[in-house]
Image: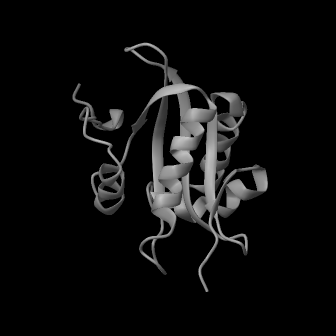
């Protein structure tokens, strides 16, 4: 039987349900920190939010967080700051639905473009995005402030 996957804007209870998926992207994240972050992220769904990819049984197979930002080239940009899709049972299910949900969210929020941030190890998900026309437009570098030289 094929799963029916659908995107849903997450409520507070569902935020806890997707925590294991989010930890696949940020392994050291604690539940309390996730809940505090998610509350701030979901305050105004007209500016973005957290969207999960759920099956008919209520299990989540993907999740992403997005915000609308002003775009340099005019119009607004939907910035997807993190995304993950678990493809444990079938390698073609959650990723395409996640990408379609991102595109639909951008259209609903009148965004002219989409920018997606992925971790370097998310190669499979990156290939899905590239397969539908996304391309590398920037390189993002990061570092913990704790380790900064004095």
Q: Residue at x 56, y 49 (%)?
A: 101
Q: Residue at x 55, y 35 (%)?
A: 106
Residue 71 as seen in the image, left or right of residue 148: right
Residue 115 as seen in the image, left or right of residue 19: left
Residue 131 as seen in the image, left or right of residue 106: left
Q: Where, by quadrant of the figure, is residue 136 drawn?
A: top left
Q: Residue at x 57, y 34 (%)?
A: 107
Residue 35 as seen in the image, left or right of residue 62: right
The picture places residue 13, in percent across and down from the top left corner, at: 77, 56
Q: Is residue 28 visible?
A: no
Q: How is the image coloured?
A: one colour
The picture places residue 29, in percent across and down from the top left corner, at: 51, 54
Could you tell me which quadrant the C terminus lies in?
top left
Figure check: 130 above or below 70: below
The picture places residue 93, in percent across and down from the top left corner, at: 50, 69
Could you tell me which quadrant the N terminus lies in?
bottom right
Q: Where, by quadrant of the figure, is residue 56 drawn?
A: bottom right
Q: How many marks?
A: 0
Q: Foreground: 62 or 147?
A: 62
Q: Is residue 55 visible?
A: yes
Q: Residue at x 67, y 48 (%)?
A: 35
Figure check: 24 above or below 39: below
Q: Foreground: 15 or 88?
A: 88
Q: Foreground: 73 or 30?
A: 73
The picture places residue 15, in percent across and down from the top left corner, at: 69, 54
Q: Foreground: 36 or 71?
A: 71
């Amino acid at each position: 039987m094929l799963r029916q996957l659908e995107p849903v804007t997450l409520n507070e209870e569902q935020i806890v349900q997707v925590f294991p998926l989010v930890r696949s992207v940020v392994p050291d994240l604690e539940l309390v920190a996730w809940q505090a972050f998610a509350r701030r992220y979901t305050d105004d769904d007209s500016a973005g939010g957290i969207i999960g990819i759920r099956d008919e049984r209520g299990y989540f197979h993907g999740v992403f967080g997005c915000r609308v930002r002003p775009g340099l080239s005019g119009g607004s940009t939907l910035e997807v700051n993190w995304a993950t899709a678990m493809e444990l049972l079938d390698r073609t299910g959650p990723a395409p639905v996640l990408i379609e949900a991102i595109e639909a969210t951008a259209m609903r929020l009148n965004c002219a473009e989409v920018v997606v941030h992925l971790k370097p190890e998310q190669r499979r998900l990156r290939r899905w995005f590239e397969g539908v026309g996304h391309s590398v437009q920037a390189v993002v570098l990061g570092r913990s402030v704790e380790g900064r030289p004095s």
